[in-house]
Image (cartoon, rainbow, N blue to C red):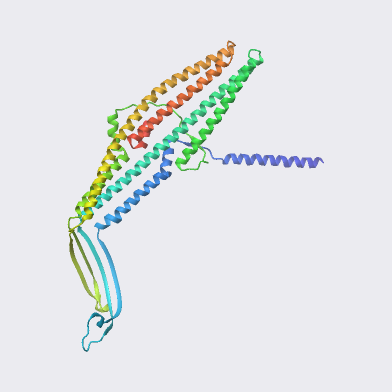
Amino acid sequence: MSWKLFHIESVCAGSLLLGMACCAALDAQSPLPYRLTLEDAINKALAANLNGLQAKARVDEAEGTRVRRYAAALLPRVSAQAYANAQNRDLRAFGISFPGTPEVVGPFSNYDFRVYAQQNVVDMAGIHALRASERAVDSSKLDYRNARDLIVRATASLYLFAESSAARVDAASSRLTDAEALLKLARDRHDAGRATGVDVLRAEVELANDKQAVLIARNQAKQSMFMLAREMGISSATPLELAESLHFEPVVQRQVEELSLAALAARADYLSVASQRQMLVEQQRANKARSYPRLTVSGNFGGIGRSIGTIQATGLIQGQLDFTVFDHDRDGEAQELASRVRSIDDRIADLRRGIEEEIREALLNLDSSEQEVEVAIQGQQLARRELELAQDRFEQGTANNVEVVTAQDELARAEENYILAVTGHVDAKFALARAMGDTENSIARFEGK
């Protein structure tokens, strides 16, 4: 009996050790969270975001269209051809009928090996069409840059949202610690007969509220990380950890006029529209050049003969001059292009005003949020001081814990005001970076990197 008991104990002990070893192995295999910086998040989003990938594909497509439809028309066209045949002919079918002439001749063979070449020497319409296609490629490249700027702006906003959520978790956890200390103090004073049960109950209610606030804040923080992971094109199951926290850093502001001029030289969307206008101007020139003569030189060289042994070298070179005598389609196209130019001029003017408005709004928000941060910092200091005084009064027995609970609520409000103010200030910097163009580098400058 004792041997069986020893055996059972040994098996249980072995199973326990095996289970502990397995748990340790699983813990060792669990990946550590990746510490994600804002720069890392932007780089990953730029590499994986669908909008950026599609914009890059449109650049390649525009380049292919330029080569296939326009550049190829101005380059030499060379082809080679070889054939051999054996045939007979019905002369009567061709109107040849003489006494003594057979109706059908043949069979006879024919061999021909030849290279053909053609080159447009003078084609002004084609030249302007090629230049228009080059401007179209430039516009697509600028659209790609603009798509990247939008991705950077969206990623920075999501990272900022995650930072704000993490700051709310920290603030809620700090309030939870204060609530636990208040409950302990209330119970100690109640046990000593220096506080009522209402004080204990009030502290318990405050603790329950703070626990719920922590749960809500943590849930929001996890959701913000999911959204950030989605923007970066990685699985939401990937463990991530923010390497940067929400912080306030003032920005040296400049004049609107200075920033507007810099933005017009850097904004990819504005430059893209300007490039589209240049494309339309080249199309107008191509339309006008349709009435110009076009000179083409073509020729061929090869060998022809009735048998391989009788092949003789032959060739041809010719010049062709084409004139357009009447082309009413050109007038209609000219009218269409003129309308498009007027439309894009209106678009350029509207975009110029929009860029200035974005810069003014971002500067206004920067100035306002910076003042809000200063006020919020003062509010935090005052709320913490109020909480300390209320805790001292409750501990000394000169007041109940109503003042403490009220002070805790005021501190929570002050901390939320600070988070909102700093978040608004950072978001205003990101908005100004977007308004100025070259968003990625502008954000890095604003962040002091």
Picture coordinates of residue 110, whole percent (x, y): 27, 77
Q: Quadrant of residue 121?
A: bottom left
Compared across the picture, whether 338 is left or right of 152 comes to left
Q: Residue furthest top?
A: 398
Compared with 43, 168 (above or below) is above
Q: Residue furthest bottom?
A: 100
Compared with 113, 426 (above or below) is above
Picture coordinates of residue 144, whole percent (x, y): 35, 44
How many labels sit on residues? 0
Compared across the picture, whether 182 is left or right of 225 comes to right
Picture coordinates of residue 73, whole percent (x, y): 26, 57
Q: Is residue 448 visible?
A: no
Q: Nearer the viewer, residue 79 or 402?
A: 402
Q: Residue furthest right?
A: 1
Q: Quadrant of the C terminus?
A: top left
Q: Quadrant of residue 296?
A: bottom left
Picture coordinates of residue 56, whole percent (x, y): 37, 47
Q: Is residue 184 visible?
A: yes
- In percent of the image, x 54 and y 26: which residue is there? 173
Q: Quadrant of the N terminus?
A: top right
Compared across the picture, whether 308 is left or right of 449 comes to left
Compared across the picture, whether 18 is left or right of 315 comes to right
Q: Nearer the viewer, residue 273 or 392?
A: 273
- In percent of the image, x 74 and y 41: which residue is there? 10
- In percent of the image, x 39 and y 25: which residue is there? 369
Compared with 260, 320 (above or below) is below
